[in-house]
Amino acid sequence: NAGVMQNPRHLVRRRGQEARLRCSPVKGHSHVYWYRQLPEEGLKFMVYLQKENIIDESGMPKERFSAEFPKEGPSILRIQQVVRGDSAAYFCASSRDRGTRNSPLHFGNGTRLTVT
Amino acid sequence: AQSVTQLGSHVSVSEGALVLLRCNYSSSVPPYLFWYVQYPNQGLQLLLKYTTGATLVKGINGFEAEFKKSETSFHLTKPSAHMSDAAEYFCAVTQDYGGSQGNLIFGKGTKLSVKP
């Protein structure tokens, strides 16, 4: 009965490199959300995906960031040409259905990205 | 647009004392409200939620919160603090329909310290 699994837990990248963050949702969940937590801030919504579809990416920076949730395999958040300002904790959450009334979000333990 | 304000970024109480963490929200539609707890280097765990019905909701670990529409508040309380309650607490709001369905809007969090 595994929860949301994120890896790696910690990721260090030099400026200009690419960061790939992976998220395996709870078994049976087909809705995935990515959030970013900056130091001393709450979580900020980035993107919402269902299998093979991006439903809402209104919180994603326009450049360098992309997300996917393929038919098979985990959801991937990809950050190209990382900068120091990308240093943050990135959390993935999943739910069985869209909406949270009867289908609350289950969060993973996050990936802490450090850009040096 | 929805928003959440948590008053007090840090709250310190003595063990056995009342815990009161404040949350006010702004929403143009009936809100769904949540409290999450985050222990160091972990993800968020759902404490309790309000969707419809009874305005006093009980959660895990002895916490409860009351939805007060007239005050646009959803304060979190616990009658007697325990050392294990030391963590960061996040209030969140969402709506159950429309383009933002399921996308949680978080407050900045309140760090709770419990003194022996």
Image (spheres, grey):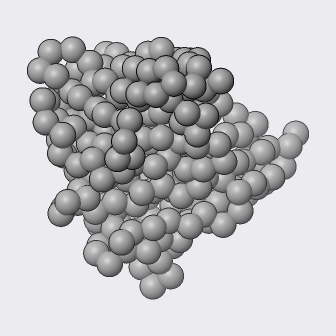
Q: Against B79, is A84 above or below?
A: above
> At which x and y percent is residue B78?
63, 54
B9 sits to left or right of B49: right
> At which x and y percent is residue A2?
34, 16
Q: Against A113, is B90 above or below?
A: below
**From this viewpoint, which residue is outermost toward the right?**
B116
A101 sits to left or right of B37: left
The quadrant in which the N terminus of chain B is found is: bottom left
> At which x and y percent is residue B52?
28, 65
Q: Against B43, is B104 above or below?
A: below
| Residue in the picture at 44% in, 16% down | A7
| Residue in the picture at 46% in, 49% down | A44
Q: Against A43, is A24 above or below?
A: above
Toward the viewer: B40 or B56? B40
Toward the viewer: B33 or B59? B33
Which quarter of the picture shows residue B98? bottom left
| Residue in the picture at 17% in, 45% down | A55
